[in-house]
Image (spheres, rainbow, N blue to C red):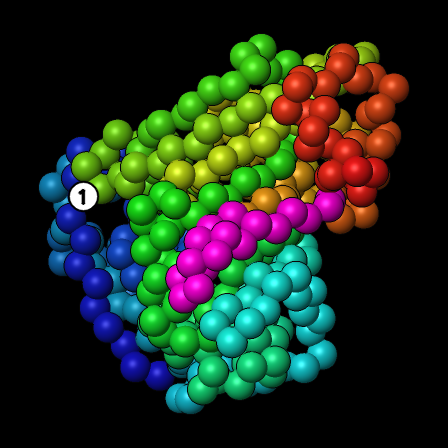
Amino acid sequence: MAQRIVDLLVGPESDGFRLDAFLATGEGMPSRSACSKLVEQGLVTINDTPATSKSEKVLLGDRVRATVDDPEPLVPEGGPSPNPYIDLDIRYEDEHLIVLSKQPGLVCHPSPGHVDDTLANALVAHCGLAHLGTLQGEDRPGIVHRLDMDTSGLMLAAKDDSTQKALQDLIRLRTLDRRYVTLVWGYVAADSGTIDTGIARSTRDRIRMAVSDEPDAREAITTFRVLERFEAARRDEGYTLLECHLYTGRTHQIRVHMRHINHQVIGDPLYGRGDLAQNLGLTRQFLHSWSVSFAHPVSGETVELRDTLPNDLAAVLESLEGRSMGRTEAGEGICPILLGRA
C-alpha cells in the first residue's frame, strides 16, 4: 500500500485542539479514530518531534506532519460492478434520465464499507455503465445529486453526460425545484422562513457539517413552511412538520440548518437528540424528498413528481394525529398526498 506525507499548519481556528481532532480536520485525512492510530504508530510529528499522545494539544503555528496510507481504490477500473438485486423504484424514465424513489439505508455511490451495494451499482445493472453519465467520475455513474443514506425519496439520475451536465446546471441555477418534508422538535412559531448561512465541515468532528462564517464555507439557503404542528406532551416539547425547499445542495444541509435554529430533525443520529422515545421510535432521520419539478433538458416539458411517505415515517405521523394543533393552508394540500389519502 502506498504512503503519502500530509503537512498541516495549526491556524487560529485550531489553536488548542487535541492532536487527533486536529489531524481529522486536514484535507485528505482519515477519521479521528484512524488519526489516533497514526499517533500510536509513531507516524505523526509536531515541529519535527514525534508525537506521543493523541490527546496532546496543538498550538498556533505548530507544524504537524503525518504519514498516511493511501487506501486501495474503492471501485475497480471500469466503474462499479452491476448489482441487479437492489430494487429500483423508478417513477419516470426515458432515454435521457430517470427519476426514482430511493429507499432509506441505500448509499448513493461506493464509499468505505459500501463497494457493491449502492444506488450506483443498481443503476449500472439497470442501464449499463455505457448508458450513464460519468461527469462526476466513473465511481458515480448517473448520479446528479445525492441523498444521505437514511434519507428517502425522489432523486434524479442521468443516462448521458450532456443530460447530467444540464441537470446539474439546473441545480446551480436554482431552477430544479426540490422539496423535502421533515418532522422537527418543538413548536416552530413562524409559518414560513428562510435560513441563509455558510456551511463547512466541522473543525471538531470531520463527519459533521456546521454553520460557519469561515471564508471556505459555502452558501446554503433553505426556505421552509409549516404544514402541521403537534402539541407538547409530558416527555417532549411537541413537534412541527415542515416542507423545506432547497436552493443549494450542501451536505446535510437541512439537518444542519434545523439544528442551527434549535429545531433538530426527529431521529437524526448525527445532529439530533438521542432519546429513542422522544424520537418517536425512529432510528433514522425523518427526512423525505417528496417533490421534484424541472424542465426536461431535452424536450423542455415540465417533469413534476410527488412521493408519499415510506411506511416508517407515515406511521410516526399517524401516531401523532391525536395531538395535532391543526394544519396550515399548505399542510391541507400536502399532508393528504404524503399519507396517500389524496
Asked whether the viewer can see residue 148, the reply is no
225 vs 28, nearest the viewer: 225
| Crowd class of label 1 (few under 14; some 14 to 19; many from 20; radius 10 Å) | some
299 vs 191, nearest the viewer: 299
206 vs 143, nearest the viewer: 143
Asked if residue 75 is positioned above or below residue 253 in the image, the reply reads below
Q: Identify the residue at horizontal 85%, vertical 32% (top origin).
A: 318
Q: Secondary structure at mark 1?
A: loop
Residue 274 x/y as whole percent = 66, 33
Number of marks in picture: 1
Residue 115 x/y as whole percent = 54, 76
50 vs 120, nearest the viewer: 120
Q: Identify the residue at horizontal 21%, vertical 63% (top origin).
A: 6
The N terminus lies in which quarter of the figure? bottom left
Q: Which residue is mark 1?
A: 10
Q: Identify the residue at horizontal 68%, vertical 45% (top origin).
A: 284
Q: Identify the residue at horizontal 18%, vertical 33% (top origin).
A: 12
Range of the magenta residues?
Answer: 293-309
Image-based side of 191 in relation to 51, left or right: right
Residue 164 x/y as whole percent = 39, 67
Q: Is residue 202 magenta?
A: no
Q: Residue 125 appears in which quarter of the rendering?
A: bottom right
Asked if residue 109 is positioned above or below residue 181 in the image, the reply reads below
Q: Residue 28 appears in which quarter of the rendering?
A: bottom left
